[in-house]
Image (cartoon, rainbow, N blue to C red):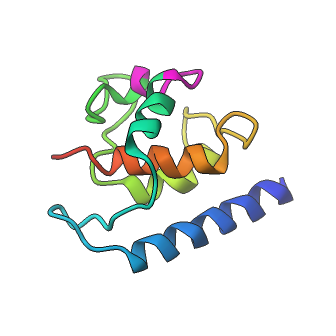
Amino acid sequence: MRVGIIVSILLSSVFLFYTNCGKVGEYGIATIAGDAAAGEVVYTSVTPACVSCHGASGGGVFGQAGSIVGKAGKVMSTVRSGISTMPGYSTSDISDQELIDLAAYVATFTP
């Protein structure tokens, strides 16, 4: 439990560093230094796959999960800790780099 909290804090710090150093894009989302193409692989292949609940474009699937469009920053902490019916994913499920890549991919979703 304590390790999970520490990892969440570290990832949040990394995210804040990247977003504060990045440019704000068209939708007010700061650039995330990750590989969006690699993040797409994570989004569609992790078990259970993000896409199965959040949909192909992140808009959410009725009765499964809400939209994550415009919430790339929140993805970083929520993936590790989980929320509501969404499980948390450890670093053995999704590495720190894969999580950064996943956030970069989610940042490409447009409203």
Q: Is residue 52 above or below residue 86?
A: above
Residue located at (18% from left, 46% from top): 110
Residue located at (56% from left, 21% from top): 48
Instruction: Using the rendered view, name the quadrant where residue 66 is placed.
Output: top left
Residue located at (35% from left, 54% from top): 71
Q: Residue furthest bottom?
A: 20
Q: Is residue 41 above or below residue 110?
A: above
Image coordinates of residue 69 in percent, x first then y, are: 28, 46
- Taking the image as shown, residue 9 lies to the left or right of residue 83, namely right
- Taking the image as shown, residue 62 lies to the left or right of residue 5, namely left
Image coordinates of residue 39 in percent, x first then y, are: 45, 39
- Taking the image as shown, residue 56 lies to the left or right of residue 13, namely left
Image coordinates of residue 91 in percent, x first then y, are: 73, 43
Instruction: Using the rendered view, name the quadrant where residue 86 is placed.
Output: top right
Image coordinates of residue 46 in percent, x first then y, are: 57, 25
Q: Which stretch appears magenta?
A: 45-52
Q: Residue furthest right?
A: 2
Q: Nearer the viewer, residue 4 or 28?
A: 28
Q: Nearer the viewer, residue 108 or 8?
A: 108
Q: Is residue 72 magenta?
A: no
